[in-house]
Image (spheres, helix red, strand yellow):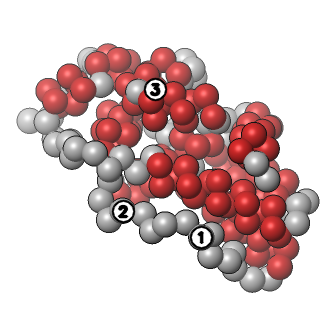
Amino acid sequence: MDETEFWDLVDSTREGAEGDPDTHADLLVERLTELDPETVTDFARHFESRFQRAYRWDLWGAAWVLLDGASDDCFENFRCWLIAQGRHVFEGTLHDPDSLAGLLGPEFDPERDGEAEEVGFAAYDAYEQLTGGELPDLGLAEPPPEPVGEPLDFEDEEQLAGSYPRLWARFRAGLPRTA
């Protein structure tokens, strides 16, 4: 599976899910189980490499603003969701995390969207269904122990508003500020 095939599979299953991340995960598993185990492993490798690329402080800050807070687990689920949004949104957000404000449609609801934990397990579930075993080692480097880049003070709303002015204006402006 090459990169284009990876993104085509992500896009087609997202469209079929009509924005529901759990349905998206189910559709991914369904489509992946139509493939051979080696191709499923390739999909997992593509997914995991993007998941690691998104382990960055600036993306965590964007998730924090977008979702009004993002714990470690929430940030993991956010990265799965970001990949699930497709190549355009993923690459655009990596290039400029604040651009996420314009990349998301008007239907985005921070109470419902922004996390897709099950999408991150789709290849693992499909491989297990196909083989009865666990995915083999993907041969990727270990992720860094900390996100890449300069840490942000997520409690400093002034810093967040200045770092992500478009996200702040769209998702946080008008909300009561915490002390």
Residue at x 24%, y 26% (from the top left corner): 163
* Residue 33 lies in quadrant: bottom right
Residue at x 45%, y 68% (from the top left corner): 142
Residue at x 44%, y 30% (from the top left corner): 95
Q: Nearer the viewer, residue 108 or 80?
A: 80
Q: Nearer the viewer, residue 76 or 108?
A: 76
- Amino acid identity at mark 3: Leu
- Amino acid identity at mark 1: Gly
Task: Write down the residue under mark 3.
Answer: 100
Image quadrant for the C terminus? top left
Residue 119's spot in the image, x, y percent? 64, 53
- Numbered disc in front, either 2 or 1: 1
- Judge whether 75 appears above or below 65 on screen: below
Closer to the N terminus: mark 3 or mark 2? Answer: 3
**Can you see residue 101?**
yes
- Numbered disc in front, either 1 or 3: 1
Q: Check if mark 3's residue and mark 2's residue have beta carbons within 8 Å.
A: no
Q: Which mark is residue 139?
A: 1
Q: Check if mark 1's residue and mark 3's residue have beta carbons within 8 Å.
A: no
Residue 156's spot in the image, x, y percent? 13, 36
Closer to the N terminus: mark 2 or mark 1? Answer: 1
Residue 143's spot in the image, x, y percent? 42, 63
Closer to the N terminus: mark 1 or mark 3? Answer: 3
Rate crowding at label 2 as few (under 14), some (14 to 19) or many (20 or more) other CA atoms within 10 Å. few
Q: Which mark is residue 144?
A: 2
